[in-house]
Image (spheres, rainbow, N blue to C red):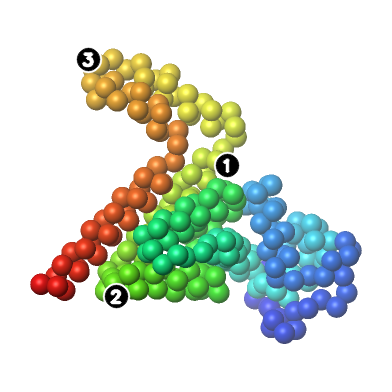
Amino acid sequence: MSERVVPPTARQRRRPTKQGVVLSEELIVATALRLIEEHGAEALSVRRLGRALGADPSSLYRYFRHTDDLMLAIADELIGRTLRIWRPTGDWRADLRDLGLRMHAGALAHPRAAVLSSYRVTGRAYEIQAVETILGVLREAGFPDADAVRIYHAFVDQSLAFGTLDSASTALPKAAREAETAVWRATYARLPRATHPHIAATARHLMADMPRSSYPAALDMLLSAAAARLAEIRERAEA
């Protein structure tokens, strides 16, 4: 795509596409997201996207300057899909845990798109809303601003990192995923105690735990550390 883009007020396509639909930014993003999950990163081309929409590829320039601009919109839409179903309760720890798990689940629902977009900073509406919301949860819980930012940073990076890691695993062919899972039983569970005493002692736990994502446990550790920090802050304030 080029650097030419039409302002939002002038983007509406007056005539339906060949498939009888009226183009919009939302429709283009949803279609691109579907194509990425079906075909991978190579699906994100103007020609293939135009074909899927039944529209002239040049009409996409009315909405996005280039494919990277579209990729940022896709990343922002993934954030939005999480925010639209998340409902805070006022319990900061429970709310962040629920939000983190929903972010992780959202990545696994769109693994190929998550791998492509999780490291991007979009500067778009949903990302801004997420930053404002998470900082608000932390500041209202009583964290000073510097602590709120550090915990926000760790919380978001942890969620995105695990989302990318687990999405990459999910995107593997089924046979490859099953082969990797089998390694824990076929290799690690058979290592002798004489040469690998710690692996041998924990083998049954490794076989049970390693095929699963460690994100819930890591998230709980992060939130426990944050809670301990908040308790320390309150103790100092009362002293």
- Mark 1 belongs to which amino acid? Ala
The secondary structure type at the circle numbered 1 is loop
In the figure, 201 relative to 227: above or below? above
Q: Quadrant location of residue 184?
A: top left
Q: Position of residue 140 (x, y in %)?
A: 35, 73
Q: For the point 70% across and 68% down, which residue is it?
A: 26
- Mark 2 belongs to which amino acid? Asp
The secondary structure type at the circle numbered 2 is helix
Q: Is residue 160 visible?
A: no
- Mark 3 belongs to which amino acid? Ala
Q: For the point 41% across and 28% down, which residue is it?
A: 208
Q: Position of residue 101 (x, y in %)?
A: 47, 52
Write down the residue under mark 1: 171
- Mark 2 or mark 1, which is nearer to you? 2
- Circle nearer the N terminus (3, 1): 1
Q: Position of residue 231 (x, y in %)?
A: 21, 63
In-front residue for pair 234/125 = 234
Q: Quadrant location of residue 32?
A: bottom right
> How many angstroms separate mark 2 from mark 1 (CA)?
38 Å
The secondary structure type at the circle numbered 3 is loop
Instruction: Tell me if mark 1 has few (under 14), some (14-19) or many (20+) residues whose alpha carbon lies within 10 angstroms of its own.
Output: some
Q: Position of residue 141 (x, y in %)?
A: 32, 70
Write down the residue under mark 3: 194
Instruction: Tell me if mark 2 has few (under 14), some (14-19) or many (20+) residues whose alpha carbon lies within 10 angstroms of its own.
Output: few
Residue at the outermost left position:
239
Instruction: Tell me if mark 3 has few (under 14), some (14-19) or many (20+) residues whose alpha carbon lies within 10 angstroms of its own.
Output: few
> How many angstroms separate mark 3 from mark 2 (CA)?
52 Å
Write down the residue under mark 2: 145
In-front residue for pair 188/155 = 155
